[in-house]
Amino acid sequence: MGAITNPKNKPTELAGEYKLLSFYNLAIASASDTLTLSVASNNVSEIQNVIVCANAGQDAAFTAVAVSFSSLVITITSVEQDGTASTAWSDTTVNLIAIVK
C-alpha cells in the first residue's frame, strides 16, 4: 500500500456546511493507495462520499479503479482486466472528488 503525498486540491463550497474537494492527477503507485485528509491540512472533519475515475495510464495491467473510505482515510484500489490486483502503474493517474464536512 502506498500513501499519496502532496495532493493538489480545489475546495468548492456547497450550501450549508459541506464542500467538494477535487483532487486531480493523483499518481497511483500500487494496487492499493491511500490519501489521508485532516482538519489541519484540508479543513475536513468528515467524509460523506468519494468519487474516483481513472485519468491516464489505462492498459491491461490497470483497467479499473475503485474507492472506499473510513474516517478521514480514502483508499484507492486498482485492478487488471481479469479482476486481480494491478501490477503496473506507469504514468497512471486518477481524479477524485470528495464530499466533505
Image: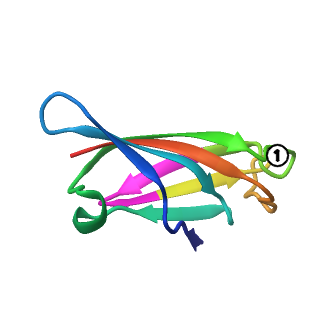
- Kindly report the secondary structure that dominates the magenta region of the rendered protein: strand
Direction from residue 7 to residue 1 in the image, left or right:
right
Residue drawn at x 59%, y 71% is 2
Residue drawn at x 49%, y 59% is 7
Q: Nearer the viewer, residue 22 or 77?
A: 22
Residue 63 in which image quadrant:
top right
Considering every residue shown, the one lying at the far left of the view is 16
- Would you place residue 59 above or below residue 33 in this image? above
Q: Which type of secondary structure does the marked residue at label 1 adopt?
A: loop
Direction from residue 80 to residue 100 in the image, left or right:
left
| Few, some or many residues within 10 Å of mark 1 (<14, 14–19, 20+) | few
Q: Position of residue 99 (x, y in %)?
A: 32, 40
Residue 71 in which image quadrant:
bottom left
Considering every residue shown, the one lying at the far top of the view is 15
Direction from residue 98 to residue 86 in the image, left or right:
right
Q: How is the image coloured?
A: rainbow
Q: Amino acid at mark 1?
A: Asp
- Would you place residue 88 above or below residue 100 in this image? below
Residue at which label 1 appears: 82
Q: Position of residue 28 (x, y in %)?
A: 66, 59
The span picked out in magenta is 66-74
Question: On the rendered image, what quadrant is the N terminus found in?
Answer: bottom right
Q: Is residue 33 magenta?
A: no
Residue drawn at x 32%, y 60% is 72
- Would you place residue 5 above or below residue 58 in this image? below
Q: Position of residue 86 (x, y in %)?
A: 76, 57
Considering every residue shown, the one lying at the far right of the view is 60
Direction from residue 60 to residue 58 in the image, left or right:
left
